[in-house]
Every structure is written in C-alpha cells, then in structure tokens.
Amino acid sequence: MVTLIILSALGILTLFAQVLRFKKALFPLILVGLATALYFTLPQYNNNPSTWFSSMLGFDNYSAAFSRSIIVIAFLWFMMARNYFLQETSGTDHFALIIFSMVGAISMVSYSNLTMLFLGIEILSLSVYVLAASDKGNILSNEAGFKYFLMGSFATGFLLFGIALIYGVSGSFDLHTIRTSVATHQQPTMVLMGILLLLVGLCFKASLAPFHFWAPDVYDGAPTPVTAYMATVVKTAAFGAFFRLFYTCFPDLIEQWSNVLWWIVALTLFIANITAVRQTSVKRMLAYSSIAHAGYLAIAIVSMNGDASARSILYYTLSYSISTIAAFTVLYIVSRNSGRDDFGAFEGLAKTNPFLSFVMVVAMLSLAGIPPTAGFFGKYYIFQNAITTHNTGLVIVAVLGALVGVFYYFRVIIAVYFKPEQSNIPVTVGSLHQVVLFITTLLTLLLGIFPDWVLQWI
Amino acid sequence: MEKTAILILIPFIAALTQLFVPRKYGKRFAVGASLLTFIVALVTFCGFPSSGDYQYVTNVTWIQSLGINFHVGMDGISMLLVLLTTFLVPLIVLSVVQSETRTPVFYSLILFMEFALIGVFTSLDGFLFYVFWELALIPIYFICLLWGGERRASVTLKFFIYTLAGSLFMLVGLVFLYLHTPGSHTFDIDALYKAGRALDLRSQVYLFIFFFLAFGIKMPVFPLHTWQPDTYTEAPTQGTMLLSGIMLKMGIYGVIRWILPVLPLGIAQCGSYVMWLAIIGVIYASIIAITRSDIKRLIAYSSIAHVGIIAAGIFFVSSENGLNINGVQGAMLQMLAHGVNVVGLFFIVDIIQRRTNTRKIASLGGLRLKAPFFATAFIILTLGAVALPLTDGFVGEFLLINSIYMFNPIMAVLGGLTIILGAVYMLRMYQRVVLGEPSVETENFFDLTLNEKAVLIPLLIMVILIGVCPNIFLKVSEPAVRKLLTGF
C-alpha cells in the first residue's frame, strides 16, 4: 500500500515540476521515488495478505512480487526514455502520465475486487492512450493513439459486461466470494458467459489473437520509448491481472475455459510468429514478437499449476521485459542515428559499435530463448508447468513457434555482423543509455544462471 | 575442487580472459590454456580407476525449487570423450593461421566451445546437460557466421534452427522424465534412469523419438543430415574441425548416456528402424562421396558414412542377454578414431586450399613430388579413415560390424560396404590429389611448415596408437559401459 501512496504522490509532484521550477531535479527525484517505492515492496506477506479499503485491494506475496518487477522495469525504462522525453517533449506531464499508469499497473496486480481491477486497467490505459499519441507531429503516432483508444474502450466494454454477469450470479465483486458462488452456482450458462466475456476483454488487453489486431499498428506508430513501455510494463501488469483473476476466481471451472484459451494461445503463437518473419521493420518485428510472447505467457494460464504458474509468469514477464528494454534501447539509438528502423539499419553495427551489437545479440538470444539467457529459463519453466498439467500438445505448438522465433530474431544478429552497403556513421551511445544496456545485459545473463533469485519472490 | 569441475572451469576462465589478451598474443594464450586443460585431462586419464562409477564428482545445488543441481563427474565413457576434446582443441587452435580477422573473440569462442563440450560430456544432471548442450551451439554458430564462407548466413541459420529443433524436443522429453521422478522431482541422472525404465512401452517409444531427434540431428543420421554438408563446407576450417571432430560426438554420447540406459523398451521397439536408417545413410553418403569433386565436401559425406556405422552399432539390443558391450565399446573407440582422422583430414584440406586456392580434385595432383612429408601425413590419415588394420579406424569398425552382424548378417554386409566404398573414395581422392603430375595450381606447393607439423604429428601418433593398442582406451570405458547396460 505504501508503494501505491508513494507512487501517487510522486505522480502529483511530477506534475508540478514545471510550475514550481524544479524541472532539472525531476529526473533524479523520480528515480529516488521509484527506489523508495521499490523498498516498500520488499516485505514478505506469506499467508497473511494485508487488505485495504474494505478488501478492495489485497497485498500478498503475489502482488508484492509483481509490483517489484513492475517498478524495476519502470526504473530501467525511465533511464532509457529520459533523453527522448526531456529533449523532444515537455517532459513533466509525460513522466507524470507514466507514473500514474504505474499506479494503475500496481492496482492491477493487487486487486481483490473486480471494480478495482476495472479501475486499475482504466488508470493504466488512459495514460498510455495519451502517450501513444504523444508525438503530435507524426500522423502514425496519432493513429496509434486513436486506434489504441478505440480498441481499448471496446475491450473495456467486454470486460464490464463480464463483470456485470459475474456480479449477477454471485452478488459480489469480491474475488473469494465469487469463487465460492460460481463453483456451486445453478446457472452455469450465465457464469460461463461472464467468464468468456472477461476472457475476451483481457485477451484484448494482453494482445492475444484473434484480439491482437490493434497491437502491431499501435506499437509501430507510437514513439519507440512508449512502445517499449507498452511492451514491458503494460504487458506485465496485464498478465499479472489476468492470472490473478483466473487463479483466484475460476480455478474450479478450469475445464470449461481452458479449452477456449488453449485455442487462443495456439492461434496467437501461430499468427504472431509467422507474421513476424515477414516484417522488414525491426520495430514491427518486435511488435509481433511481443504478441508471440503474450502467447507463451498465456500457456501458463492454461496450465494452471498453483503457485508454480504464478512464478513462471513473474519470471517470464521480468526476463522478457528486461531483454525487450535492451532491444528497444538499441533500436532507438540505431534508428535515431540512421533515420531508419529496418533490418538494414543494423548492418555493420558490429564494426561501428561492438558494445551495442553485443547487447543486441544477448537480447535477441534471450527473446529467442537460448540458454544461458533468462529467456531460456522463462520458456523452460512455462513448458515444464504445461507438461505437468498434461498440455504437452500446446508445448509442441510453442516449441515450433520458438523455432520460427529463432529465424526472425537471428535476422537481426546476422544483420549486425554483416558488412554494410555503404560505410556507416559511427554510433554514439549516451552514458545513461550505456548504464541501461549494461544493467539489462548483466541481468539477462545473471537471471538466466540464477533464476532462484526471482522464483523465491512468490 | 574435484578434477571434473577444474576441467570445466579452465576453458571457461580462459575464454573470458582471452577477450582481454592483446591480439598479438591471442593464439599463444589460447594454445597455452587449452594445453593446460589437456594436461589436466591426461593426468586424470592416467590415474583413472577401473570402476564403472562416476569419479571426481561435484554436486552443488543450483535451482533448489526445481531439484536442479550442478552435478558433474566422469565415468570411463565421459573420460574418453573429455580426453578427445581436450586433445583436439589445442591442435585446432594451433591450426589457425594468424591474420587480421582472427581476433581474440575467435579464440575465445573456441575455448568457450571447449567449456561447453566438456560440460556436456560430464553433466550428471538432466537440466545441466541440456544447458551445456545448447551452450555448445552458440560459439560454433558465431564461429561459422563471422568467419565462414560466402553463403554462411543462410547455411548457419539452417544449421542452428535444425539442431535447436532437435534439442527442444529432447527438452520436452527430459521434462517428461523429470515429472516421473518420485517426490518433488529431481533432474539427477540416476533418478531419471529409474524413471525412464519404469515407463510403459508407449511412453518409451515417444521419448525415444524425442531424444532421437536431438541426437540424430547432431550426429547426423540419414535423413536428418541435410544441414551437415553445407555447414561443414561453409564453416571456417576450425569450425569444421570442431563440428566434425567433437560436436558430432555429442550426438553419439547422448545416445549412449540418455537413450541406452533409459529406454530399453523403446530401443527394442524402434532400434531396428534406426539401424536401417543408419545403414541406408552409410551407403547413400558413401555413394555421394564418390561423386564429389570438392575434397571438403567429400570428407563431409564420408563423415556421415562413418557416423552411420556407429549409430547402427549402438542401437542394437542383443536378444540373448540384452548386452551390447562390443557395440558400445566399438562406438567409443570409433569416436576417438573418427575425431582424430577427420580433424587431420580437414586440416589437410585447409593446407591444400591455402596453397592452391582450390579444393577441386580435378585441378590438383602431384603433391607427392612437391611435398613428401605432407603426402606421408595424408596417406596415414587416409588409411586411418579407410580402417586399415593397425590404424585407428580398424578396431572400432570391426567391433561395430561384429555387433551389427549379431543382429542381422545382411545389414552387416551392407554396413561392411562402408569400408569398401570408403576405400574407393578416399584412395581415389588420394591418388588424384597426391600422385600423378603436378598441375598449374600445385606448381608452387611447398611442404609442411613447423606449425603445421606440430598439428599433424600428434594426430598421426594417435592414429597409430589407437590402432596398435586400443586397449589403453577400451579398458577405461569398459566398466562404465558394462554398468550402463546392465543397470544398477
């Protein structure tokens, strides 16, 4: 709870930076604020969750772990995005929006009441709608914001419908009450309709096929740092919320809804991986790859295996986000330098900047799931849980998807090590970006070798 | 610290240090580091106790919540392969011709590869084995991608995805075994063995297919071999040597360590199909080898043929007592022999290519007159490859064919063709390249330099040593093979 209060206060403070003229101190202030918020996520709750606001919010190990992960990712993201926002936008209001969206993200992983889930999603989404359109001069950015807003509202509609039906059945928004009443309810159709609508709403937010159509355009159109934020923090929060809902409310009806989700996952893995192969822009490729990763993550929800599944989602989102931040940072630097974001822009990078190319190689290996990077263990753990719960068929689909994944991730690696057509301009990396890249690469390798560090959070 | 862990650590630390060594001393450092590893391995080999148990074991908890340990150790089987790896790597490093493009990263990748390979051969934990298995793929991919030939990008990507496909299926298989271990599950090798043996026929057949995909692609066995000729041809010489000399043994080792003791029913059911595939591969590859005009490609295909015999020999389960000690022992010896021969032959190809800028058989000839020492080295390696008695290829091939004969005489006859066909393509190549009159390309061919002699002489000694006294090696692996096949 303290984390949430600190973040809200930090957001409000950030808004005043322009007026009260401490804009210079703003960035360090945000980092300190995030570190403090991080500190307050450290206590372990074990089996005594602390509830707030008449059980609207419940903090337990699960929410603490996801909050920690969200703040760590956001911390890295701020270091990545600082230059863009301070140089090309007014900075303060955008930073404030990000911090508010983090408040939404943390509510999304800590709710114990469906209204709070809805509020969390809205707080998060509204900020990100604005941010997606923040490059006002760019028509693609405007399109991204508008599309995201329309699709997001549409999804919210589904979600609300679902919540209403579930409320109609159980007479409560409280997760635990819902669990007991839906399990014994006499009107399964209404319950199942409710679950289905919730599922559709959340699949929209998590960009799972066939509800993913907005994602490539939005990711592609939004400014690169905002895309990085959507692909990491927003995705982590979405899956944190998704899993929490189905794990707490509907585990007894898993036979009914897991069939639907099974096909959604298979479809996502198929469509996203195949489409990613055809992309010429690295940014768009990363957008499709992020949809594919949503597919792998959703396997963990289909194969509900108690806390082990929660751990696998936590680990996967964290490792995926860290590598994605690294990849987007390199993409940002490279595309600023050359003005392009296709694979050709990366050619000859190994010659002009070996450090950047090494970072990119590690990030791509991690996203492709090759040991010893964190991405490998993330996939492994999800696969293991799926096999435990007899979803081996889905694992085979995912394995084939991962192989296709290697194909498009390695296109970047091959481009990096190939001679450019014309001699490139040397690429310079700011010191803040160097720190981000160093930390993300180190974390990718360390978490891959010592996954227990994260697994013991839950 | 136990010797196994030391053997794994030396190349790893060396690979990291290598990055900071000045370019001038890069090769010397890499040779030194890999020689040091070899000396440690040799000392271990000389003092290796004649027991089938794992020696020099290190067992440290790694990922506690999943029952994964850093558990390494060696029995006789591992010992021989570690010896082969550590023996070949210094020679491979030594064979590098210093030039601008051979940066410290190149040597570092070779040492990293050695680290991963030793890890594969000594892992006693299923998860650890998989991680090392995949780790070995990364350096070789980059060696081929960064220093390979014209078509390297597409060829190496095919190689990577092909082998990764097999590995991922193996991972699924390993997890399946892991979930059948009692209690809160463990990846410990003995527990996995027990779990595997207790499975019913259906599960064993599935697991057999999953594991075989990984190992069969790595070896490679027909029809999973299509990545191999291209990759061998496009890779730089050192990459080809690593791939054919050592990495290919990962596949055979995998079969010996992870299929034979784990899936007896699976082998009884599917083993004969694999043997037929392997035999078809032997003949197919031999015939293609005869028609090749590029010597590097010819040796690549000959490698498929040799591996085919090994694969056929180990998959056989005797109907009388269930023991196939001869076959597995033959495979062990043949792995050593093939490693030595093929590395030597690819080095010979490299020498020819560097001096004449061609690998076409038709444009070569008369090297004997120009370079007598070279011709002698070449003939010894060739004879080793065609399995002449008293050279290294003979004993292993004999044991393997003997074991195939016990399964099916016709198959043994077909498999025996490998020796005859091998003699056809190897000797024909030798004749055309070395004998006859010098051509325009070979006009200025000069004999071996000191550096090249330093690479070839140890290999030649090994060719003779394995051929004359195979028992030095066989007696080390025998107790381990016996224990592996009889169970515990």
Image (cartoon, grey):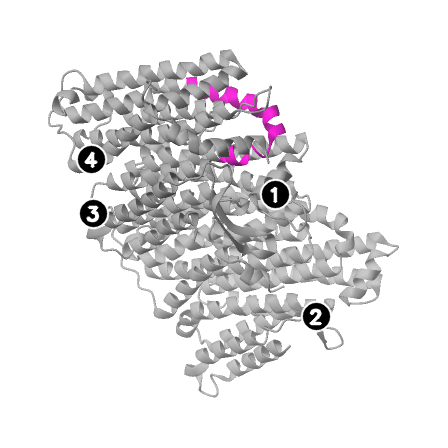
Please name the residue that numbered disc 1 is placed on.
B191
Res. B452 mark: 4
Q: Are marks 2 and 3 in contact (CB under 8 Å)?
A: no
> Which residues, given as a range, are shown in magenta?
B254-283
Q: What is the spatial separation of the Cα atoms under label 1 and label 4, in whole angstroms?
A: 47 Å
Work out whether disc 1 and disc 4 sit on a shared chain: yes
Chain letter of disc 1 in the image: B
Q: Are marks 3 and 4 in contact (CB under 8 Å)?
A: no
Q: Where is residue B406 shown, x and y percent of the image?
A: 52, 16
Q: What is the spatial separation of the Cα atoms under label 1 and label 2, in whole angstroms?
A: 47 Å
Q: Where is residue A309 shown, x and y percent of the image?
A: 65, 55
Res. B100 mark: 3
Query: What residue is shown at x 61% (from left), y 44% (from top)?
Result: B178
Q: What is the spatial separation of the Cα atoms under label 3 and label 1, in whole angstroms?
A: 50 Å
Residue that sits furthest to the left in the current view: B444
A381 vs A171: above or below: above
Work out whether disc 3 and disc 4 sit on a shared chain: yes
Looking at the rendered structure, the kind of residue marked 1 is Ala
Q: Earlier in the sequence, mark 3 or mark 1?
A: 3
- Quarter assignment of residue B372: top left
Res. B28 mark: none
Q: Earlier in the sequence, mark 1 or mark 4?
A: 1
